[in-house]
Amino acid sequence: MLTDFAALQQELRRIANHRRVGRVVAVSPASLEIAGLTHQARIGDQVAIGLRGGRTLGGEIVAISQATARAMTYAPLDGASVGDAATLLG
């Protein structure tokens, strides 16, 4: 007996199953430079910065260049470092 999964496959295609993730390449006192998001990010998009140790910082894209996107966070940058993951939330 064969099971028809066509309807299930169609529903699964509708689920957004990926997130864009970049990496912090520079940290300054007021902002982060993020590589890997420049072709997807827009001014005002939200990001989540995953710090080593498990803490997450929320932030907003405030500038975009060919190489990086700049984000300002909603909390102090204590603990942020080069290599931290930056997930684009939209």
Image: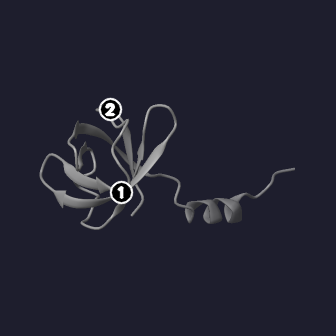
The quarter of the displayed image where residue 6 is located:
bottom right
Write down the residue under mark 2: 83
Q: Outermost residue, right direction?
A: 1
Badge count: 2
Q: Residue at x 23, y 49 (%)?
A: 31
Locate residue 68, reporting x and y percent.
18, 47
Q: Locate residue 12, reporting x and y percent.
A: 62, 60
Name above or below for residue 50 compared with residue 69: above
- Number of residues whose C-alpha sits closer than 10 Å to that of mark 1, classed few (under 14), some (14–19) or many (20 or more): many
Identify the element where label 2 is drawn. loop
The type of residue carrying mark 2 is Gly
Looking at the rendered image, the disc whose residue lies closer to the viewer, 2 or 1, is 1
Label 1 belongs to which residue?
59
Does residue 43 sit above or below 70 in this rendering? below
Q: Residue at x 33, y 64 (%)?
A: 45
Residue at image position (38%, 53%) is: 75
Kind of residue sitting beneath label 1: Gly
CA gap, disc 2 to disc 1?
Answer: 16 Å
* SS state under label 1: strand
Percent x, y of residue 40: 29, 58
Q: Nearer the viewer, residue 42 or 79?
A: 79
- Disc 2 residue crowd, few under 14, some 14–19, many 20+, Cα 10 Å: some
Of the 4 image quadrants, the one containing the C terminus is: bottom left
Observer-nearest of 78 and 25 = 78
Q: Give percent across and percent down for residue 85.
A: 38, 40
Residue closer to the observer: 55 or 2: 55
